[in-house]
Every structure is written in C-alpha cells, then in structure tokens.
Image (cartoon, grey):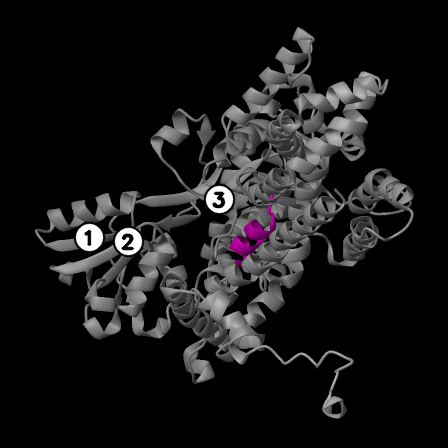
C-alpha cells in the first residue's frame, strides 16, 4: 500500500491564464469593450479617426507636391492629379518662417543661439544630469546676455541687426521664453505680496494684478507700441520688440501670481506652524517649506499659463511684429505661390510647430508631476 | 529677470530714432537717420509682400523705393514696417513711420479728422465682379438674378446693393465671414451658391490665383465704387508732402514722355524741353523740392517709370495680370495724369 504513495515535492508549473483574461484580448475586453457604453464610445472614436486620419494623410503626404518652383507646381492641371499640400511653398519660405527678415549672412547667429539654448536646456530638464546649479546659472544669467549680444549685435565686430528685421519662429520663441522666464519669479513675488501683512505691499500687489488681468493683451500691446511714444519726450524711444516683451511679461506675471496664490492657499497652516517650531525664520519657512509644496500643487496651472502664453505670443502681430504666424500670413500674399492649397499647407505646417512645442511642455509637466508624487 | 533688466536698460540707452512730427523736419530727419521708414501692409499680393528671398516687393513697396532713390540714390535705404489695417494711421501720426504706402483709400474724413495728407493716387481701385467664363457674361449689367458672394462686414455689400438697385436688377447676396471661405465656395461652386464673386479689382485678381483653374474665370470691366489708393503723410510738413506727391507725378510723366529704365541714359541727350526739365538737364525742379537735379533720373533708373512699376508688380508681367483700366495714362483713356514739371 505504501509503495504507490506519491508525494509531489515541487509546485506544478502554473498554467497560462485563460486566453480571454490575458494578453491583447483581455486588454481589448477590459479597456475598449468593457460594456455597452464603452463599446459604443470605442466604435464612435474609431469612426472619427477613420473620418479624419485618411484624408489628412492623403492631403499631407499622398497627394502632396514635394518639389517645384512657384505656384504652377501646385496646380492640379500641371500635376495632372488632385493636389494636396504644397510643400515647395514651405521650402521656399522656410528661412523667413524661422528667421523673419534676419539678414541671410547673419543667420548663423540665430542658429548658434538656438543650439546653445538647446544644449543648456536639455540637461536642465533631465533630472539625472549633473551640475544643475552651474547649468541653471548659465541658462538664466549667462545665456540671455550671450543671446542678446549675438542677436542684436554691435559688439565684437558683429553687425547690428535691428529687431524690426527679426521675425518668424525666432520672435515667437524670444517672446515666449522671455515671458515664461520672467513671469514665474515675478508672479511668485506678486503672489507673496498679495498675502503680505504689510498693507502697502498688499494693496500695490492687488492693484498690479487686477489692473493687468483686467486689460486685454491686445490693448496692452497696442498701448505700449503706439500710445506710449506720444507721452514720452521726443528723444526717448524704446525698441518696439522690447515694448512688446515687457507687455507680455507683465501680463503673464499677473496671471501667474494668481496661480501661485492658489498653491499657497493649498498648503495647510500646520506646515507654517511646524516650520516655526523647528526654528525657521519666515523667509526660510517660505523658501524651504511652503513654496516647494505650493508650486508642486499648481504645476498644471503653471503649465496652463505657459501654454496659453506661448499661443498668445502671436498677438504681437497687431503691433507690426511678425511672429511665426505673421510671417506665414505675409508669405500667403506672395503671388508667386498663391494656389488653392497654399493656405492649408501653411496652416498645417505652423499648426504642427505650435503643437510640437505645446505638447512637449505638457508632457514634460506630466513627467515632473509624477516624479514629484513618487518622491512623497 | 536678468535678461529683462539688461534688455530694458540697453533698449532705452541705444535704440533712438523716432522723430516727432514738426514742420519741414521730415526730410531732414530721414537724411540724418540715413534711411526712409515706410509703412506697408502685412502682405497684400501685388502691393507689398516678401518674396522668396525675403525682400519686400510690390507697387506700394516700389513707391517707397522710388522715394529712397530720389533722396539717397539708393533703393536699399528704406526700412519697411508692416502694419495692420488698424494700426496704420496711428503709426503715421505717432511718427513711427515717414510715409504710409499701404493701399489706403483717400477719403475726406481721413484727410481731415485723422490729420493726414494724401499727396497722390498711385492705384485707382474699385469694386468689381468676377464670374466663370462658362456663364458667358461680359458685363456686370448682365448679372440680373445672380447670386453674388463676398466677405461680410465691408462696404462691398452696400456698394453692390446700390449698384443693382440703380440698374433695376435683382440679385442674391451671399456673405461669408472671411474672404477665404467666400472664394472657396465660389471655386467649388457647390449648389450653385455663387455665380459671381465681388471685392475690389486688385483683390479679385489676387483671389483668382487661389482658384483651381484661374483661366476659367474673368474679371468684368465694370468698376462700381471708388477706392483711390495712395501714399499718406502727416499734416504739417508741406515740403515732404510735395516730395511724395511729385515722386509719383515724376514717374507718371516719365512714362508719358517715354522715359524708362532702359532709355533714361539715352534720354539725357534728348532735345525735348519737357524731357530735359524732367531729367534735370534743364531747370532745377529737383532742387526746388529740396532734392538734387537728377532726382528723376535716379528714380527711373533704379525703380522705373509708373508703367514699368505697374506691369512688373500687378500688371501683365506679374502673375496677377491686372488690366491697366483706370490706371492707364490720361492719353490712353485712363486717369493717371501728372501736372507739368516746370
């Protein structure tokens, strides 16, 4: 009897889960077809995709014209087929879309600024990269000076390039980066000022914030550009682009102040009390305990303001500064390229550029949010 | 922050240049500065638009180049400031620009209330109609019962209403929010919604280029409104107004007398007294304006006479192909007429 006894010494290997509960099928079942509502939504989304994507690919790639000189290349009768995007138009105008009217021989200066910004910004954004303090000092102090000297010229034998000649993506980025970099510290100061116990500081901050939030950006730009010279003495003059830069920065700072104030209100009173109990001075409490938590809370709001600001930069067009979109509109007026598809090609191209920047900012903010949460 | 502070300080310190308006000061200001500042549109086909090389081209642009040629003997000494329809007059009044060559219509209220002067008319524009050739219509008077497409919120609707009412014709106005929508509907011809498209003549030729088959469409000869376009200057500096006015007249006179960029050198030896006065080989017309004797030679050699400028930018040598029409010389049935230079 004992002879036939069998004692299994190890576990039998686990069977694979049933097909319906694992792998792509399970994913499909739980994510896309979990119930009637989910199924309907999935099918509706597929329908929308099917309606949008194929025509878009047809227009942008399959039917597109890739080479040629002038509008004739992008006409259906020349091509002998339906014509989609007119890419030679973008190719011919690419220099203007990026540099505006910056002299061709001096464009390397803009390239150098772009390359330096990229080389300094990427290590600043990637958490494991070393030398953060040095990097930040270079980016926020040395780089703006170098960029100013390079772009404007006048030193080291560089020819002066008036800001009137700037345009395209260059102007969009200069306005957006200046606005973004200036608005955050200014906004934090204003938010702190608004919560201050000193009435003069508080009321000044409130007045500043409410004034700039109460006026449309277009009015600010128009006033700065055309009305200000009427009030200033004749010999005074401030560069046109600079006026717009200050207008945008001040405007964005007012919005940023309210975002930051929201974060400050979200930090519990106990954090202040705890910091006081540890013997921290008020400014140490603010800088080391409250602000880091407050800013983390409002990352979505901050990025919202940044993205809004980036897209608002195109309003500088109304004060005779050609940003990316302004340069595109000017390119539309060139009779050499007027064709039925020119308009759509141009907007598709600039749309992609704006999307790349805004989506990039949004994804990076997402990444930082998750990283900060993980550290909690 | 640092960037802003530094930029602010340097901007105030270095970049001077805006002169305030005062009598007789404009020309001196331009000469002292070393270049003319000219307000143009932010992009209007045939009038001012950057080409592939990023140089401004067009009828309005060439007018400013002619001024630069007359003042500096160098067409490159002009800075173009692209202005929107809203900020153009403010820019002129505030002294940001010396002259506004931005397809602006000369009207009484602009001339008086805005404190401007319109020294000359460089392009006689006006509202017209474009139709498909297949309609076999050769005159706007045959458009009775047609549906007409245009952009809403402009005077074009009003002008068309007046015109059709005056001629006892029926019509249906289809107005779109933007020109691009209107021209697209006209082009696709969906549901026969647009038999004709209406806007100003120069605009019709420009919009025609955006159609799938521009050759299938024709601009009718009738012009139903007056849109005299020309350069504008500030009130109060008559010398500068004279220079702007006579620069246009000189270009028209040059065409009338057969002086072109190709013939100007040979014409310097012409015995014709009118040509001699124009080119400064006799008299001192240029010096009376505060310029040099050879000011017209400079203009014609470097920019061309009025006909050359017209054909190159909007006329038969351009992609627009606008007919001379009202812009022909007075001797050829048009309205371009220049008082004598003597």
**Which residue has dot 3 on it?**
B102
**Residue sitting at 24 percent across and 50 percent down?**
B224
Question: What type of secondary structure mainly makes up the magenta span?
Answer: helix
Q: Which residues are magenta?
A: A320-331
Residue at the limit of the structure toward the top, as seen here: A199
**Mark 3 vs mark 2: which is more N-terminal?**
3
* x and y, in percent, of residue A39 in the image: 39, 67
B95 lies left or right of A161: left
**Residue A321 magenta-highlighted:** yes
Q: Residues within 10 Å of mark 2 (few under 14, many from 20)?
A: many
Query: Real-space Cα distance between discs 2 and 1?
Result: 8 Å
**Which residue has dot 2 on it?**
B150
Q: Residues within 10 Å of mark 1 (few under 14, many from 20)?
A: some
The answer to which image quadrant residue B212 occupies is bottom left
A252, B166: nearer the viewer: A252
**Which residue has dot 1 on it?**
B173
Q: Residues within 10 Å of mark 3 (few under 14, many from 20)?
A: many
Asked if marks 1 and 3 touch (Cβ < 8 Å), the reply is no
- Label 1 marks which chain's residue? B
Point out the frontmost of discs 3 and 2.
2
Q: Say if labels 1 and 3 share a chain.
A: yes
B196, B302: nearer the viewer: B196
**Residue sitting at 60 percent across and 17 percent down?**
A206
Query: Real-space Cα distance between discs 3 and 2?
Result: 22 Å
Inspect this view and state whether residue B341 appears: no
């Amino acid at each position: 009897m004992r002879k036939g006894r069998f004692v299994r010494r190890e576990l039998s290997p686990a069977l694979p889960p049933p097909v319906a509960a694992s792998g792509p099928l399970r994913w499909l079942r739980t994510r896309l077809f979990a119930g009637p509502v989910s199924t309907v939504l999935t099918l509706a989304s597929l329908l929308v995709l099917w309606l949008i994507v194929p025509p878009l690919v047809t227009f942008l790639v399959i039917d597109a014209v890739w080479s040629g000189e002038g509008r004739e290349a992008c006409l259906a009768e020349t091509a002998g087929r339906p014509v989609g995007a007119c890419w030679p138009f973008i190719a011919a105008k690419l220099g203007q879309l990026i540099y505006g009217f910056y002299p061709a021989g001096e464009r390397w200066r803009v390239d150098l600024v772009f390359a330096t910004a990229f080389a300094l910004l990427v290590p600043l954004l990637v958490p494991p990269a070393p030398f953060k303090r040095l990097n930040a000092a270079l980016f926020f102090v040395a780089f703006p000076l170098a960029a100013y000297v390079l772009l404007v010229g006048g030193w080291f034998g560089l020819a002066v390039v008036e800001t009137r000649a700037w345009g395209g993506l260059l102007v969009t980025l200069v306005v957006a980066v200046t606005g973004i970099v200036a608005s955050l510290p200014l906004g934090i100061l204003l938010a702190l000022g608004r919560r201050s116990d000193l009435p003069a500081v508080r009321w000044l901050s409130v007045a500043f914030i409410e004034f700039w939030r109460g006026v449309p950006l277009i009015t600010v730009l128009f006033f700065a550009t055309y009305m200000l010279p009427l009030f200033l003495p004749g010999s005074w003059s401030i560069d046109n682009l600079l006026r717009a830069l200050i207008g945008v920065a001040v405007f964005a700072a007012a919005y940023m102040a309210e975002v930051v104030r929201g974060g400050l209100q979200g930090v519990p009173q106990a954090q202040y009390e705890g910091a006081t109990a540890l013997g921290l001075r008020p400014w140490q409490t603010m800088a080391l305990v409250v602000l880091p938590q407050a800013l983390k809370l409002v990352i979505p709001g901050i990025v919202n303001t940044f993205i809004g600001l980036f897209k608002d930069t195109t309003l500088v067009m109304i004060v005779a500064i050609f940003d990316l979109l302004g340069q595109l509109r000017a390119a539309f007026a060139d009779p050499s390229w007027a064709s039925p598809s020119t308009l759509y090609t141009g907007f598709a191209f600039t749309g992609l550029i704006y999307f790349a920047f805004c989506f990039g900012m949004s994804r990076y903010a997402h990444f930082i949010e998750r990283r900060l949460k993980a550290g909690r | 922050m640092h960037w802003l502070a530094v930029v602010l300080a340097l901007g105030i310190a270095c970049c001077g240049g805006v002169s305030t308006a005062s009598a007789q000061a404009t020309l001196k200001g331009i000469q002292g500065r070393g270049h003319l500042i000219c307000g143009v549109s932010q992009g209007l086909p045939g009038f001012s638009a950057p080409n592939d090389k990023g140089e401004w081209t067009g009828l309005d642009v060439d007018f400013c180049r002619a001024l630069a040629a007359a003042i500096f003997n160098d067409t490159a000494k002009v800075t173009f400031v692209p202005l929107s329809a809203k900020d153009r007059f403010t820019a002129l009044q505030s002294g940001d620009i010396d002259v506004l060559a931005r397809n602006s219509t000369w009207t009484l209220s602009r001339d008086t209330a805005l404190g401007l002067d319109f020294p000359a008319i460089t392009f006689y524009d006006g509202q017209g109609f474009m139709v498909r050739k297949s309609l076999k219509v050769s005159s706007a008077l045959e458009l009775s019962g047609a549906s007409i497409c245009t952009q809403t919120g402009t005077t074009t609707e009003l002008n068309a209403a007046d015109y059709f009412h005056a001629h006892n014709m029926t019509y249906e106005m289809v107005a779109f929010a933007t020109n691009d929508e209107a021209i697209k509907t006209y082009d696709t011809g969906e549901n026969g919604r647009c038999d004709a498209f209406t806007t100003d003549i120069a605009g019709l030729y420009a919009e025609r280029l955006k159609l799938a088959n521009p050759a299938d469409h024709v601009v009718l000869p009738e012009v139903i409104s007056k849109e005299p376009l020309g350069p504008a200057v500030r009130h109060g500096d008559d010398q500068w107004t004279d220079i702007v006015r006579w620069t246009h007249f000189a270009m028209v006179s040059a065409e009338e007398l057969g002086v072109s960029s190709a013939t100007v050198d040979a014409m310097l030896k012409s015995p014709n007294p009118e040509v001699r006065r124009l080119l400064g080989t006799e008299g001192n017309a240029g010096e009376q304006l505060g310029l040099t004797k050879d000011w017209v030679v400079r203009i014609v050699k470097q920019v061309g006479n009025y006909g050359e400028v017209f054909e190159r930018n909007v006329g038969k040598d351009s992609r627009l192909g606008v007919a001379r029409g009202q812009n022909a010389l007075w001797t050829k049935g048009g309205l371009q007429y220049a008082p004598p230079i003597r």
